[in-house]
Amino acid sequence: MIKYGTKMVEHQTMESFICDKCKKTISDDMGLQEAYSIRFTGGFNSVFGDMNHIGCDLCQNCLYKLIGDFCVYNADE
């Protein structure tokens, strides 16, 4: 027999986001849905440095200004 119960679980939610480029603070739900966090680790001979942890948080407008000319829309993944 399986008995079920309920349990309250706390989890973290993003309350605000500060763009690393324009420094704008975003706290509305729609803006937070379009906030981008880029995280990666530099590899061997990387311009970022071998094994360096790199991070950048950008609003949608700044990300578009940086990479918009290179984007391919509706590209197959």
Image: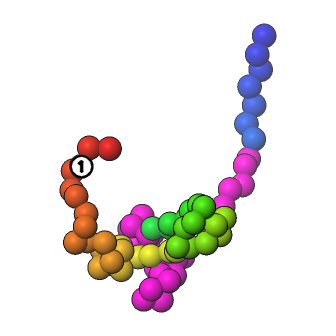
Left or right of 73 on screen, residue 67: right
The reply to whether residue 69 is visible in this rendering is yes
Q: x%, y% of residue 56?
A: 52, 74
Q: Secondary structure at mark 1?
A: loop
Q: Which residue sits furthest front? A: 45
Which quadrant would the C terminus be assigned to in this image?
Answer: top left
Q: What is the crowding at mark 1: few (fewer than 14 residues within 10 Å), some, or many (at least 20)?
A: few
Among the 4 quarters of the image, the one containing residue 5: top right
Q: Which residue sits furthest top? A: 1
The amino acid type found where label 1 is placed reads: Ala
Is the residue 24 above or below the residue 72 in the image?
A: below
Residue 27 on the magenta segment: yes
Q: Which residues are magenta?
A: 8-35
Residue at horizontal 39 percent and vertical 67 percent from the top: 34
Left or right of 62 on screen, residue 53: right
The reply to whether residue 14 is visible in this rendering is no
Residue at horizontal 72 percent and vertical 49 percent from the top: 9
Left or right of 10 on screen, residue 71: left
Among the 4 quarters of the image, the one containing residue 73: bottom left
Q: Main secondary structure of the magenta part?
A: loop
Q: 43 and 3: which one is in front?
A: 43
To which residue does mark 1 refer? 75
Q: x%, y% of residue 71?
A: 25, 63
Residue at horizontal 73 percent and vertical 36 percent from the top: 6
Q: 40 and 9: which one is in front?
A: 40
